[in-house]
Amino acid sequence: MLASESCAFDLIHAEFIRELEPGEVVIIDEHGIRSEWPFPKSRSAFCIFEYVYFARPDSNLTGSNVSMARVEMGRELARSHPVEADIVVPVPDSGIFAALGYSEESGIPYYPAFVRNHYIGRTFIQPTQMIRDFNVRVKLNLIRSAIEGKRVVVVDDSIVRGTTARSRVVNLRENGAKEVHMRISCPPHKHACHYGIDFPDPEKLLANQCSLEQIREYLGADSIGYLDVPGMVRATGRQMNEFCLACFNGDYPVPFDAKFDKLVMEQRRDQARLLEPPAERLF
Ligand code: SF4
């Protein structure tokens, strides 16, 4: 069995043996199992956003559990961006563990006041703005009695376009929150991912276009605080040079060819479609 996340093995009671190395190709055929390294060895550049958002909390990455790293990110965030408040509210699902860490470290009570609609997918990877806007509205509902009249720290894992975060702040205020303090368990996303993660054009990344104060103003929050790169890395228990941090610091560990960039390919596909005869476009 091979899987992209260790939680898959728990489900079938499989014994975890080891993680594949960067660049390792495993071949399973009639001769058995063997590994090859067809590319020159280079330094590891693990996607740190796996710890922040992508991986399941019940998975382990290089021996450490993802949920624990997220709790630690929340603790780091509470130390670097403290605030006086009455309640810590997570944005489900990926903000849950960071909010727990923030609450534990700050001593502010945790309350999961957002209730998630599990029939809606991840909002930032939806293909159109219209679908994203609709999904943002129906994805979460608030327990009004839990937050009315309270100073709320709302903890989320990241802000990409800002659409979702802004809508959460509006939602909290509409439901009677006295103050809303936004805390984010990773640094601002300022750069594109050229390695396959479906972030939008950098011009649509909120932190690429706005200062911290402009972001706070756009979201309508009373304060905003992002975890910094050293804090995020510390929370994983690994070293800075083991990671890809490119979408945060613009330092791309592997050169990329801009002509194969996802955005460029999509534009070429759309242009090609416009040239097709209408009947063919139906298929
Ligand atoms: S740029 Fe690097 S860290 Fe950011 S999402 Fe892509 S692979 Fe992950």
Image (tube, rainbow, N blue to C red):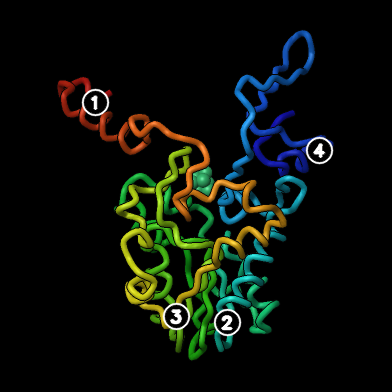
Residue type highlighted by circle 3 = Ser
How many other residues sit within 10 Å of disc 2, few (<14), some (14-19) or many (≥20)?
some
Report, in whole angstroms, how far the alpha carbon at label 1 lies from the one at label 4. 47 Å
Q: Name the residue under label 3.
A: 223
Classify mark 4: helix, strand or loop.
loop
Residue 174 picture quarter: bottom left
Indicate which disc, 2 or 1, sits on the residue closer to the N terminus.
2
Q: Mark 4 points at which residue?
A: 16
Q: Looking at the image, which is closer to me, 99 or 255?
A: 255
Indicate which disc, 3 or 2, sits on the residue closer to the N terminus.
2
Q: Comparing marks 4 and 3, which lies closer to the viewer?
A: 3
Q: Percent position (x, y) of residue 253? A: 52, 41
Q: Percent position (x, y) of residue 278? A: 16, 24
Q: Comparing marks 2 and 1, which lies closer to the viewer?
A: 2
Indicate which disc, 3 or 1, sits on the residue closer to the N terminus.
3
Indicate which disc, 1 or 4, sits on the residue closer to the N terminus.
4
Can you tell which mark lies on residue 282? 1
Q: Looking at the image, which is closer to me, 102 or 282?
A: 102
Q: Say above or below: 202 vs 149.
A: above
Do residues under tags 3 and 2 come within 8 Å of each other at their CB atoms?
no
Q: Percent position (x, y) of residue 274? A: 17, 29
Indicate which disc, 2 or 4, sits on the residue closer to the N terminus.
4
Q: Can residue 177 be seen in this view?
A: yes
Classify mark 2: helix, strand or loop.
loop
Classify mark 1: helix, strand or loop.
loop
